[in-house]
């Protein structure tokens, strides 16, 4: 029971702080770019049904489709949208924090430096590697088939995570080579792309959005890994454990 309590408390602490921080960074750096891009969508008519969480940690590509139902409910601009953004980011942070806390408990990783390293590994697997094929997309940008992009994003995230684990956890050279192969596999296969790259959205705006999305998620994962490791270190079960 103490084991699961440590994981839950650590995930709650780290997830809430990291989720709040991510929302603040998105509000300052990411959302203004989305609002600017909406002015170019459909000949200057903003599309309120666009999902503004496409830059979130686990959804750079999975949430980037613009083939959505125009009648679907979306939070209103202002405080309501900010509240739901905060809620989704905190829930995501707690869920990812629970995964990290479970890994830290099993590996006895209680040093904040190791926490940052594991956080960076999460960023690479869920954000950086998928973005190399399907970068975060603004509303109004051309996009390939939604299901194909979601499938490629999920496959890339899973294969990259598995590849990182094979590189750093086993000591055998053959497993490390296999890990590198897993990471490269989805990029060798190639990500799905739209038939036409024509877009009313300026290229500089799209580049700024991709950079801001990745930067905010990098900081999010760093905070999440650091705080999760520190929280686990202060739990009674782990207080006297030594980091591997």
Image (cartoon, rainbow, N blue to C red):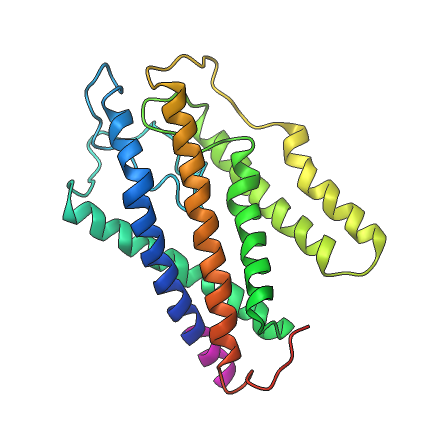
Left or right, 44 with reference to 191: left
Residue drawn 49% across the image and 73% down it: 230
Which residue is drawn at the image coordinates 52% and 70% (left, top)? 229
Rendered position, 219 above or below 103: above
Q: Image point 58% across, 65% down: which residue?
A: 113
Residue 160 placement (x, y as % from top left): 62, 46
In percent of width and height, residue 51 lies at 30, 37
Q: Nearer the viewer, residue 28 or 13?
A: 28
What residue span does the magenta drawing correspond to?
1-8
The image quadrant of residue 204 is top left
| Residue drawn at point x = 67 percent, y = 56 percent | 165
| Residue 101 visible, this orientation | yes
Q: Is residue 106 left or right of residue 229?
A: right
Q: In the depicted view, which residue is nearer to us: 16 or 143?
A: 16
The percent coordinates of residue 78 (x first, y second) are 15, 44
Q: For the stretch drawn in magenta, what is the main secondary structure?
A: helix
């Amino acid at each position: 029971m103490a084991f699961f309590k440590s994981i839950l408390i650590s995930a709650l602490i780290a997830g809430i702080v990291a989720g709040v921080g991510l929302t603040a960074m998105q509000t300052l750096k990411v959302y203004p770019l989305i609002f600017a891009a909406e002015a170019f969508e459909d000949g200057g008519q903003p599309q309120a049904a666009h999902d503004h969480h496409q830059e979130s940690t686990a959804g750079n590509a999975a949430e980037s489709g613009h083939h959505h139902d125009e009648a679907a409910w979306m939070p209103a601009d202002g405080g309501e949208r900010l509240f739901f953004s905060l809620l989704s980011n905190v829930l995501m942070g707690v869920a990812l924090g629970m995964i990290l806390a479970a890994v830290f408990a099993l590996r006895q990783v209680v040093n904040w430096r190791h926490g940052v390293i594991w956080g960076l590994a999460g960023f690479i697997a869920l954000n950086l590697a998928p973005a190399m094929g399907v970068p975060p997309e603004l509303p109004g940008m051309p996009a390939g088939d939604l299901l194909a992009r979601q499938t490629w994003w999920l496959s890339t995230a899973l294969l990259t995570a598995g590849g990182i684990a094979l590189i750093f956890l086993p000591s055998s050279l053959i497993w490390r080579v296999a890990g590198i192969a897993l990471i490269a596999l989805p990029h060798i296969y190639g990500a799905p792309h739209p038939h036409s790259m024509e877009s009313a959205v300026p290229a500089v705006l799209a580049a700024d959005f991709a950079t801001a999305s990745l930067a905010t998620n990098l900081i999010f994962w760093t905070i999440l890994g650091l705080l999760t490791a520190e929280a686990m270190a202060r739990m009674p079960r782990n207080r006297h454990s030594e980091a591997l």
